Amino acid sequence: MNISHKIERRFPWIEASLRFTGRFGVAEKKAYRDRFGLTDGMVSRNQDAFLQLVNERCGLGCVIKKRGRLSLTNATTLPAKPVFKPLPKMADWLGDALGPRFEIVPQIRRAEPTEAILRSIVQAILGERPLQFRYQPRRGQAAIRRMSPHAIVHVVGRLHVRGWDHDRNAPRDFVLTSIVQVLQSDGTQGYVTQKYDHEWHEQVVLEVRLRDGENPEAVRLDYDLGASNCGARKVRKSHAGYLIDDSMLVRKHWLRAPVSVKVKGSE
């Protein structure tokens, strides 16, 4: 059977059905048909083509067809890595397959910077030019700040511009939505490159550890911790401060995360 690339690009959705439900049956076929705008006949032909190709790649009999439905054989598990890429994200597949029976609770949204401010900062980064801007900090009055911008970082749900702060003579982050106005540079400052931002170039290991009193069986599953109830993640030192544990500010125990996050080796 000659399988076109266009048809094969749909196969990750069928593979996801087998991984997440163990079948590609009536309900999954309907969701697949609606997802890709196909006819019932096209869905059947796609199913047969998938069956042939997945068994060629994973071994004959890995997936079987019975009464018009695909399913995994009893002794079969699909390879850890997707057979057809890219596999849809679980949330996307669930939205297709379950419809109103799958609901995503929206996160508390952060505001986005205006296009004009973002454009000015991006142009300064690409052109390696210093900037002046009016900045509103969380505490205190707005003030004029001067910096050489190096990069934009998305962390803890919002955008920051990282660069050399000429007023502090050190690298700093500024929240983009707190930049009220970008001003013309006064020309008194030259551009300072990123090579002086040592924390940007240094990496640290964040240790994610089970808190005392928490159920290790439940937390291990939720946070992908190992048998030692501890996990690790390597990040730039400049980002670590946004991710380390700040739970001491949370008074109510049930609001705290069941894990602590600290730089490895710190107290």
Image (cartoon, helix red, strand yellow):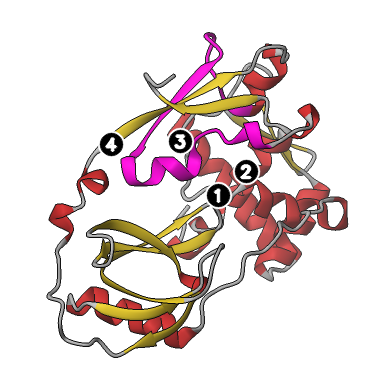
Residue lying at 38% horizontally and 83% vertically, measured from the top left: 119
In the rendered image, which residue does mark 3 sit on? 56
Q: Earlier in the sequence, mark 3 or mark 1?
A: 1
**SS assignment at label 3:** helix
In the image shown, does 45 or 28 lie closer to the viewer? 28
> In this view of the protein, which residue sits in the foreground, 30 or 195?
195
Q: To which quarter of the image does residue 217 belong?
A: top right
Query: Does residue 146 appear left or right of residue 8 in this picture?
Result: left
The residue under label 2 is 16
Image position of 197 with respect to 58: above or below: below
- 123 or 8, which lies in front? 123
Residue 203 circle label: 4
Q: Earlier in the sequence, mark 2 or mark 4?
A: 2
Q: CA distance from mark 2 to mark 4?
A: 35 Å
Q: Tell me where residue 3 appears, x and y as whole percent.
A: 47, 57
Instruction: Indicate the amino acid at tag 1.
Output: Pro
Give the SS element for disc 4: strand
Alpha carbons under labels 4 and 1: distance apart: 35 Å
For the residues marked 2 and 1, what is the alpha-carbon distance in whole angstroms? 6 Å
Residues at marks 3 and 1, CA–CA distance in whole angstroms? 16 Å
Question: Residue 225, image x and y in percent?
Answer: 55, 20
What amino acid does circle 3 point to?
Answer: Glu
174 magenta-colored: no
Task: Give how far across and how far down residue 215 sits, in percent.
Answer: 73, 13
Residue type, numbered disc 2: Ala
Which residues, given as a range, are shown in magenta?
A: 223-249
Closer to us: mark 3 or mark 4? 4
For marks 3 and 4, give the CA distance: 43 Å
- In contact (CB < 8 Å): disc 4 and disc 1: no
- Tell me: residue 77, above or below residue 153: above
Q: Secondary structure at mark 2?
A: helix
